[in-house]
Amino acid sequence: MGARATMGCSPLLPFQALWLTAAVVAALALAAGAQPSPSLSPGFYDATCPGLQPIVRRGVARAVRAEPRMGASLLRLFFHDCFVNGCDASVLLDDVPGNFTGEKNAGPNANSLRGYEVIDAIKAQVEASCKATVSCADILALAARDAVNLLGGPRWAVPLGRRDARDASAGAANANLPPPDASLPALLSAFGAKGLDARDLTALSGAHTVGRARCAVFRAHIYNDTATTDASFAAGLRGAVCPYTGGDANLAPLEPQAPDAFDNGYFRDLVARRVLLRSDQALYGSGGDGGNTTDALVRAYAANGTAFAADFAAAMVRMGNLGPPAASAAAAEVRLNCRRVN
Ligand code: HEM
């Protein structure tokens, strides 16, 4: 895999840049061993759109400068694309009332998935440089990678050459995206169905080291799961941040120490039982896999940010390789506007 991955400009603090240097080296080593699907390659647009990667990076950097949380939102957008019929930009298709119901308003996405305008702006710039050449799915894959890196996380070579779906499915989004109260067996099964194992699940869940969640999705955990949450952490969230009734849209950081820094703080929070989601805490101390695999990985990542960064980068490549079903793939296209089919 191409070794042209470099550290880009990071708006972050020196300690994060230091951490990044080590992480990049390790991430590249592991990502190099990953198996991209044969049809995808990091050099796919080298001849047809050589300016692509700088355009995407500039667009993501602008958005993250304006609002650091947007980095997290773009990363989540990519996950929600890939888990629903593969990484095919189906998540970006707008509903057409009376005609087409896509994924944007499915349960896991409505009122919380964001970043569509950032992808639109980047797509417009890419179209201006390379007309009808680069898929929205590839722009999203690059944007997610750049978002992670700009928040202080690793950088890896992104295999490219995806095409955009001509359909989207609210039902598939509801069925494939795990809910915030998922148990460890349910998470393992949802990821296993995509060919992703416990290591991928644990590493990818480290994405929750950045971003925010709404009270509606973490209320049950902080009020009901007293045996598995740190008492003072839960007490600090009850009340003004997340009342027992109302306040559904109130936000809290998924990783409160450094909510916009892509580091391994999330795993230390799991060990301390100070996380927002029941599905997060399920990775540590739940015994849901006999206590064997994910507990050990959480401890390892909590102790070693470089190991986490390397595994995260490799798992992102594997997740990014999820392809659409054959019938959708056959009909796929390079969309001109990410919100609608050509
Ligand atoms: C393992 C199963 C997962 C579950 C159950 C889950 C669930 C959630 C939930 C409920 C939220 C908050 C949404 C809201 O406020 O309504 C969230 C946010 C987020 N998720 Fe996940 N997630 C999972 C895996 C992932 C993965 C694999 C990634 C990326 C690789 C990811 C990236 C994010 C990010 C970055 C945010 C914050 C987004 C923002 O601030 O806009 N999640 N997730």
Image (cartoon, rainbow, N blue to C red):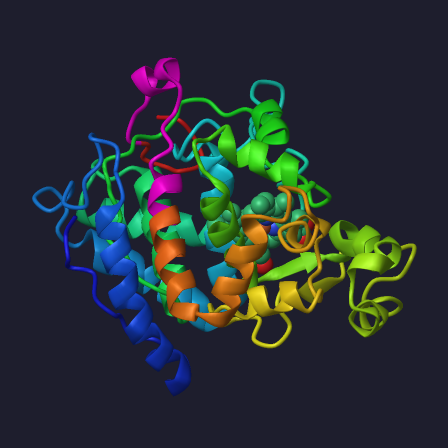
Query: What number of labels is visible?
Result: 0
Q: Which range is magenta?
A: 316-334
- The quadrant in which residue 6 appears is bottom left
**Left-right relation of 175 to 75:** right
Residue 79 position in % (x across, y down): 48, 44
In the image, residue 206 lies in the stretch drawn in magenta: no
Q: Is residue 278 left or right of residue 145?
A: right
- Give 278 or 105, whichever is nearer the viewer: 278
Coordinates of residue 217 in the picture (x, y in percent): 74, 50
In the rendered image, the vertical position of residue 6 relative to residue 199, given as above or below:
below
Residue in the image at 64% along x and 55% along y: 284
Q: Is residue 339 visible?
A: yes
Residue 199 lies, with reference to residue 229, above or below; the image says above
Query: Which residue in the rendered view is the most extreme toward the top?
Result: 327
Q: Residue at x 52, y 71 (%)?
A: 260
Report the quarter where the C terminus lies. top left
Is residue 328 magenta-colored?
yes
Q: Residue furthest right?
A: 245
> Where residue 272 sits in the image (x, y, percent)?
68, 69
Q: Residue furthest bottom?
A: 14
